[in-house]
Amino acid sequence: MLLPLDYLGVQRHLRIGFPEKFPQQNLILKVAPDAWLKWPHTFENSICLYGAGEHPSSLEPIDLVHEAIKRLRLLIGFVAKDACPISRQKEFEREISTYWNQQLTRIHQTALLLRIPKKSCALYTLSDAANRSLRNMPTWFAEEVGVLKNHASKSSKHTVRTEHLAQSAYYLALSSVPSIEIPKSEQLLQWLSEHINGTELSNFQNWLGESSKYSTRWVFLKLPETNPPKIQTLIIRGMSQQDKFIKFYGHRTAKRSKTRDNLIIHPTLHTTDVYTLEPSVIHSRNNSVDLGHVATKKIVMVGAGTLGSFVALQLAKFGIQRLTIIDPDKLSDANLGRHVLGIPELGQNKAEAMRSYLLRNMPCEKVNAVPTYLQFALYDKPSMLDDADVVVITTADWDSEKYLWELKSQGATWELVQAWTEPQAYIGHAIVSDSKMNDGRYLFEPGGRFKQRLSDWKKGGVIPLPGCGESFIPSGPVGVIQVASMVADIVIKIATGRLADAAWFSMIKAPSTIETLGGEYLGPQEYLHTNLTILSRAWPDDVS
């Protein structure tokens, strides 16, 4: 197909091809002469009509062709002879990283920016020593040495030394978007000069000179007006380095590095993916609460078993930054089918293993592990709970539960959430305190059995194990996770002030199934054939 003149005065042809798997595969569209880097959405060998996650609305051949031509017409509108240059430039800038990355060689290395600086600055660099042999070895970057040291200590069981770190990276906040064509490495400063404020340009120029002794350097370009920040990585590497070579930056790199001409002459530009561990980025797709407010709350988890582990994980993923986890038990093989932790943590204390797991996988500010019973922990440190906002107990251990209610009745200022599942986890409960209703012991029988239980099981549903008093309450992971979601939601509501009154929550899941498992459903009959119900009401009356 002959196309009209474009804004460059070039007349091009559109070639349409039908792949063998059409219509499952989209049309093949090419423009000649090549319009790569001249037209938006046009690559070296194709035209992209669909964005990330988009696809044709129909796989009917005629509909697919019509939709492709319709989208192509929009593209032609950006590049026609009389098209608006401002609109065309904005279309380029929307996907500028895509065009840049196509011109750069990608290296197999993961870059982790631990915090997003508030302004342009040099960054310290530290490689993940635990994964030094991996081809895609992670490398960490931060403005402050303390941030790197803290992250390294959380990610490693060993003491991490951070003296003489190299400032081999630079974070550059751009005021506007540079041209679409990537320059040679020696022209990098000139390419960026019009898009950096005066003082920042001078600082960046100084860094380029001072860091020239390092054979591998990173430049992180923060694109303007992007939230969460869009960051493009440029890696300056010496020509003599092999593509598979990954530079390791340790705690004495800055002291040991010397100028090595065979590494730094004729450097070239490369790229890799950069990931930011900033909480505002990680939780950017959850705008239901004020992240800054939630991050200040301290939550104490008493119990890191099946229910407690999932509650702790969900709280961390919701943005809770300060957690204390108390549990004396070790992870066993029988726990694997329904616990957050897995095979690598077998035989480890659950509290300590959960601490390591959360710190490795989430940007928690502080997670404390207390590998003993609650009563012993408070005997050794009576002030442990004093600064807590919410205490959550999921142990199903009556001695610990009534101990916390006693503390609450004596004036403890933290809010208490007692949560548990009934056998098989088709029913779960959470009792929430407030300043008036601060002693829930009357809701339970002397042995800790809930008076208002919604199911009944032979021998209380408890299955004994060989050993001294050992037993367990059967439950599957799906039911426990659903109860954990209810409990985590309750804690977040308390932390954000949306739940200030005492309440009794119950989750009822497919109660008609309980009878097939050997139990009897005692709850409201109107929910007998529902799939999932969560009830919220006032504390039940005292029933003997």
Image (cartoon, helix red, strand yellow):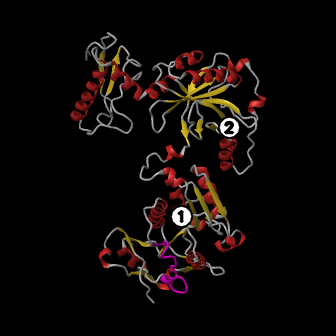
Q: Secondary structure at mark 2?
A: strand
Residue at coordinates 61% horizontally, 37% vertically from top-left? 136
Secondary structure that dominates the magenta span? loop
The numbered mark at residue 337 is 1
Picture layout, residue 209 above or below residue 396: above
Disc 2 residue type (three-letter) = Leu
Quarter of the figure with residue 333? bottom right
Quarter of the figure with residue 76? top left
**Where does label 2 land, which residue?**
126
Q: Earlier in the sequence, mark 1 or mark 2?
A: 2
The numbered mark at residue 246 is none
Measured as percent of width and height from the top left, residue 444 is found at: 50, 83
Q: Quadrant of the N terminus?
A: top left
Measured as percent of width and height from the top left, residue 114 is found at: 59, 41
Observer-side mark, 1 or 2, equals 2
> Crowdedness of circle 1 by 10 Å Cα count: few (<14), some, many (20+)?
few
Measured as percent of width and height from the top left, residue 253 is found at: 74, 32
**157 horizontally vs 390: left or right:** right
Give the residue at the far right of this rendering: 256
Quarter of the figure with residue 218? top right
Q: Tell me which segment is drawn in magenta.
A: 429-449
Picture layout, residue 438 above or below residue 334: below
Residue at coordinates 63% horizontally, 38% vertically from top-left? 142
Measured as percent of width and height from the top left, residue 35 is found at: 37, 17
Residue at coordinates 53% horizontally, 20% vertically from top-left? 192
Disc 1 residue type (three-letter) = Gly
Nearer to us in this view, 294 or 421: 294
